[in-house]
Image (spheres, rainbow, N blue to C red):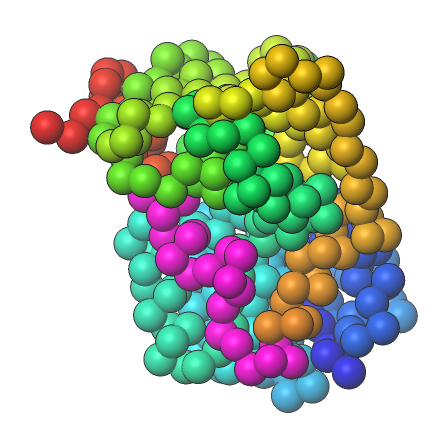
Amino acid sequence: MIRWGILGAGHIAGRFVKGLSFSDRSVLYAVASRSGKKREQYADYVTYSSYEQLLDDPNVDVVYLAMWHKDHFQWAMEALKKKKAVLCEKPAVLSTEQMEQIAQCARENDTFFMEAMKTRFLPMIIRLKALLDEGTIGTITRVENRFCYDIGDAQDTRDLFEPEQGGILNDVGSYNMASLLDYIGDEIVSVENDVVYKNGVDVHDRVTVTFANGQTGFLEMVMDEAKEPLMTITGTKGSIECAPFYRPEKIVVKRKGEEAYTIECPYEHDDFYSQIKEVEDCLLAGKIESDRMSLQDSIEVQRLADRIREIIRRGNKDEVQ
């Protein structure tokens, strides 16, 4: 039985615990939180007031990092050095350099690490990837996706406006970027961003990515306007629509000259379970990374994120000459 520990006991940890409850190969063993009130919610498990204590517990096999984004790097490195496998909530880190260090540490310690990009493991996405590989819509020419919500009046109490890690790119942007790079894997030659700021952070990004082979992507990430979280993959023979793109259960296939049709693939239990299953499969197989969300995959997502962040700082276009 695989024994899990959780570092951080906020809302996302609760969703993870629900997904873990469906597994017959894993159990939640321990939770660490600096908040006594939050530890009380996990009174049925071993609880620690410090992350160090949990990482020093020999009964913990793997940890789920559910604290603030800016703390992921420190605690991922600490866990890997102590030979604890890691599932790290997205975004795993806030720079390419940090992700490269994590990858090196995982390899040096022969210990598993995966960014919790649940989208890549959902049954509907696996089916979608198969359709694309079969050429159902021909060669992909463009991918568009958007994750847009309205935060309303909660600005002063949310970590979204915390200077070091705030902004919509650091909140949901990982889903947009990782989805794009899941379908188009060529070299990126240019990135543009039409960005809106509020309270010192980006609240609305419209990012255009151009690849060396001419394929393009458009990513819209918003926390001041609600829109349907739609993804459209356009190919030479048609298109596929998917919503919500980051946790879909159905897609609409539109082939040129043919009637559109819908394919449905429900979750295995919930939208968290599939990534937990992937971690279990990898650990039982002795792997230190996932084939679907590898260490290099996380590095590539961070490289794109860094380019977008630099554009946000400079407020202009980034282009490879």
Per the image, is 292 magenta?
yes
Q: In the displayed structure, does residue 53 sit left or right of residue 1?
A: left
- Image quadrant holding the N terminus, namely bottom right
Residue 151 visible in this rendered orientation of the protein: no
Residue drawn at x 67%, y 57% as measured from the top left: 275
Which quadrant, please, contains the C terminus?
top left
Q: How many marks?
A: 0
Position of 111 relative to 225 (above/below): below
Quarter holding residue 301: top left
Task: Judge left or right: residue 198 versus residue 68.
Answer: left
Q: Where residue 179 appears, x then y in whole percent?
A: 52, 38
Q: Image height check: is 107 above or below 148?
A: below
Seen from this angle, which residue lies furthest left? 321
Residue that appears at 35% across and 27% down: 215
Left or right for 301, reference 60: left
Residue at x 43% of width, y 68% of height: 77
Q: Nearer the viewer, residue 35 or 25?
A: 25
The region drawn magenta spans 283-303
Give yes or no for residue 39 being in the magenta stretch: no
Q: Residue at x 69, y 48 (%)?
A: 122
Where residue 63 appears, as percent x and y from the top left, is 62, 69
Residue 219: x, y in percent? 47, 23
Quarter-of-image position of residue 152: top right
Where does the image place residue 174, in percent across and percent down from the top left? 50, 39
